[in-house]
Structures are given as structure tokens and as C-alpha cells.
Image (cartoon, rainbow, N blue to C red):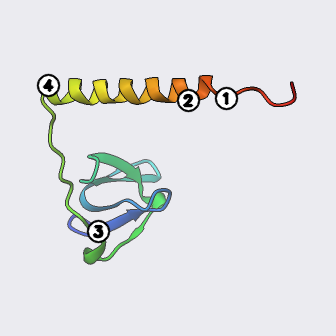
Amino acid sequence: MKVGDFARYKNTGTVGKVMDTVTEGEVTWVLLDTYDLYYDAAALEPAEPKEYREAAFKEKSLEESLEQVEKLKETLEEVEKAISRITPSGT
């Protein structure tokens, strides 16, 4: 694989564009732009350009992050209420 190629991480199916390659000893590491992580080249396979979706990463503001945390807390409270209504079986 070379810079500019597209590759798929076999474990998750994530497709990214190859941004860099580094060889250390017998292992070649490939940087994919999707998560800005290096992957062992042995865990990648070639992918077609049509499979690639450019990452639309947007850094969240503190307010957006706090809103998300509040929503998660509300969901957790609802789940806890639902669980408390369940009675153990066999008694």
C-alpha cells in the first residue's frame, strides 16, 4: 500500500485513505485518515474509492458536550427505573 491508496481495516470494515507508511523491523504501519491511527498493514486490505467516506469530524463545544452528558444521564435514569421494575424469576 502506498500513500493515496484506500484500505479497509479487516476487523471493523473501516475504510480510510492511506496518509503515511512506516516500517519498524518486520512490521509496516499504515496511517489511515479515518481516525488518524496507524494500523498494522497485515490487518488491512485494499478498498475501492467508492467505499470511502471522508470523515466528518467536528469538535464539539463545551455546551454541546454537556448537553450530550445530560441526555446520557436521563437515559441512564430511565434504564435504572425500568430495571428496578423487573422482579427476579424463580421466587
Which circle marks residue 63 in the picture? 4
Q: Amino acid at mark 1?
A: Ile
Seen at 29% across and 68% down, the residue is 6
Q: State if disc 2 and disc 3 touch (CB < 8 Å).
A: no
Q: State if disc 2 and disc 1 touch (CB < 8 Å).
A: yes
Query: Where is residue 87, by image quadrant?
Result: top right
**Mark 4 vs mark 2, CA separation in Å:** 29 Å
Check disc 3 and report the residue beneath it.
Answer: 6
Q: Is residue 1 visible?
A: no
Q: State if disc 3 and disc 4 touch (CB < 8 Å).
A: no
Seen at 20% across and 67% down, the residue is 4
First of labels 4, 1 by sequence position: 4
Seen at 86% across and 24% down, the residue is 91
Which circle marks residue 82 in the picture? 2
Check disc 1 and report the residue beneath it.
Answer: 86
Q: Nearer the viewer, residue 53 or 75?
A: 75
